[in-house]
């Protein structure tokens, strides 16, 4: 398997660590979980190059793997075009050169969206409205984010704006208790806009730094949901004309191209300012990250690779691309 160490070595020697929050534990987890043993993209690629020659067959194989991993046809073609140009100019003499070019093409796509969430402290509180279809991981993400922001010294308040399901309110309260973060809630069935309005008032009164509002992922119809979320946004604006400061869309990576469609719909209705991609551990693919980055260009703030608070980190383009290209160091481990 020596041929596959290329990517790992690259990752180890990765250029100067950006001062920003690198989380070694999290990235090791992401790498292990994303690949589940072998990289979906580069596994066995060496065997396709009997003479070490990069030709159309190898590029066709890469193309198939990219499409198969939810990268989407348009984005795959963009990646392939970059590689074909280099092959035509005879710039790719061996597997290492091909992988380096592939790495570069992938980074060109995800690099621009790796823009971490920055809490602008001139807003008090900084209001984060969390949206997404049911089951995408909104409430879990809010719990993870609350913990993270609290650890960074921010005073956080949560709003239980998913009043559609009673269990949703309890679920948020569990995360709140765990992190000693107050949760503003009303009974199930209450008007979500009213709950979130009250929560903002309460957060202002408490001098909170950040308010994170949960919302429902499903109502009787999809258009109801969008109308309700628009109303929440409007009502927040009455207390603070600049709120919400972040509309954070949570997407389940396992939904593949469907996640892209969801993102387009939410963005059109609400103007999404940041994304969280969850459940990257549940898919061996992760290619949807490239499709979404390429097609929407919305900042990708965080990724989730499991259910616990540790399985959550800031999206870093280099680390992600290296995790996609490289097999885990230990190899063959089950997730
Ligand atoms: N494996 C894995 N599971 C996750 C991740 N994020 C969330 N989950 C799980 O996904 C399920 C749904 O998560 P929720 O946070 O309840 O999703 P939601 O968007 O709030 O769902 P609704 O409230 O129904 O709209 C839960 O079982 C979570 O534990 C992740 O990154 N990886
Ligand atoms: Mg929820």
Image (cartoon, rainbow, N blue to C red):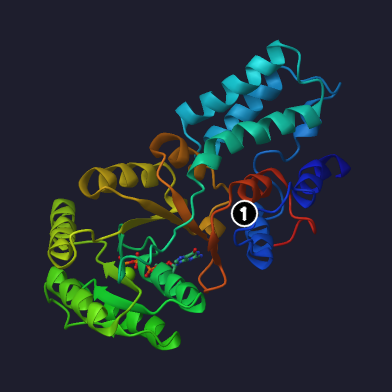
Q: Is residue 207 above or below residue 2?
A: below
Give 304 or 19, whichever is nearer the viewer: 19
Q: Is residue 257 left or right of residue 46?
A: left
Q: Position of residue 150 (x, y in %)?
A: 46, 78
Q: Is residue 43 above or below residue 203?
A: above
Q: Does the image show residue 62?
A: yes
Give 139 or 121, whichever is nearer the viewer: 121
Give 176 or 236, whichever is nearer the viewer: 236
Q: Residue at x 51, y 78 (%)?
A: 151
Q: Position of residue 13 (x, y in %)?
A: 79, 49
State which quadrant residue 34 falls in.
bottom right
Q: Residue at x 72, y 41 (%)?
A: 43
Residue behind mark 1: 34
State which quadrant residue 94 falls in.
top right
Q: Is residue 285 left or right of residue 236?
A: right
Give 108 or 251, whichever is nearer the viewer: 108
Secondary structure under the numbered disc 1 in the rendered image: helix
Q: Is residue 257 above or below residue 200?
A: above
In the displayed orientation, state which residue is furthest to the top.
Answer: 88
Disc 1 Cβ-to-ligand 1 distance below 8 Å: no
Q: Is residue 311 above or below residue 59?
A: below
Q: Residue at x 37, y 44 (%)?
A: 258
State which quadrant residue 27 falls in.
bottom right
Quadrant including the C terminus: bottom right
Q: Residue at x 67, y 36 (%)?
A: 103
Label 1 neighbour load within 10 Å: few <14, some 14-19, many 20+:
many
Q: Does the image show residue 65?
A: no
């Amino acid at each position: 398997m020596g041929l596959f160490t290329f990517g790992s070595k690259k990752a180890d020697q990765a250029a100067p660590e950006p001062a920003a929050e690198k989380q070694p534990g999290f990235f090791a987890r992401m790498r292990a979980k994303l690949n589940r043993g072998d990289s979906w993209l580069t596994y066995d690629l060496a065997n396709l190059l009997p003479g070490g020659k990069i030709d159309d067959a190898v590029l066709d194989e890469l193309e198939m793997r990219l499409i198969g991993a939810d990268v989407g046809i348009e984005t795959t073609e963009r990646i392939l075009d970059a590689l074909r140009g280099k092959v035509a100019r005879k710039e790719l003499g061996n597997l290492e050169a091909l992988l380096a070019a592939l790495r570069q093409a992938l980074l060109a796509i995800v690099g621009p969206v790796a823009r971490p969430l920055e809490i602008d402290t001139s807003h008090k509180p900084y209001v984060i409205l969390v949206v997404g279809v049911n089951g995408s991981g909104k409430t879990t993400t809010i719990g993870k984010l609350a913990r993270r922001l609290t650890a960074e010294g921010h005073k956080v308040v949560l709003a239980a704006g998913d009043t559609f399901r009673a269990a949703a309110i309890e679920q948020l309260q569990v995360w709140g208790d765990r992190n000693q973060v107050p949760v503003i809630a009303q009974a199930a069935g209450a008007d979500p806009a009213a709950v979130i309005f009250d929560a903002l008032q309460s957060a202002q009164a408490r001098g909170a730094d950040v308010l994170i509002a949960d919302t429902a992922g499903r109502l009787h119809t999809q258009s109801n949901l969008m109308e309700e979320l628009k109303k929440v946004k409007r009502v927040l604006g009455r207390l603070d004309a600049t709120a919400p400061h972040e509309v954070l869309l949570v997407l389940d990576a396992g939904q593949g191209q469907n996640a892209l469609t969801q993102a387009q719909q939410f963005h059109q209705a609400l103007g999404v300012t940041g994304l969280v991609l969850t459940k990257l551990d549940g898919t061996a693919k992760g290619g949807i990250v490239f499709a979404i980055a390429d097609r929407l260009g919305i900042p990708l703030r965080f990724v989730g690779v499991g259910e616990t608070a540790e399985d959550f980190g800031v999206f870093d383009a280099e680390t992600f691309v290296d995790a996609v290209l490289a097999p885990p160091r230990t190899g063959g481990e089950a997730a």
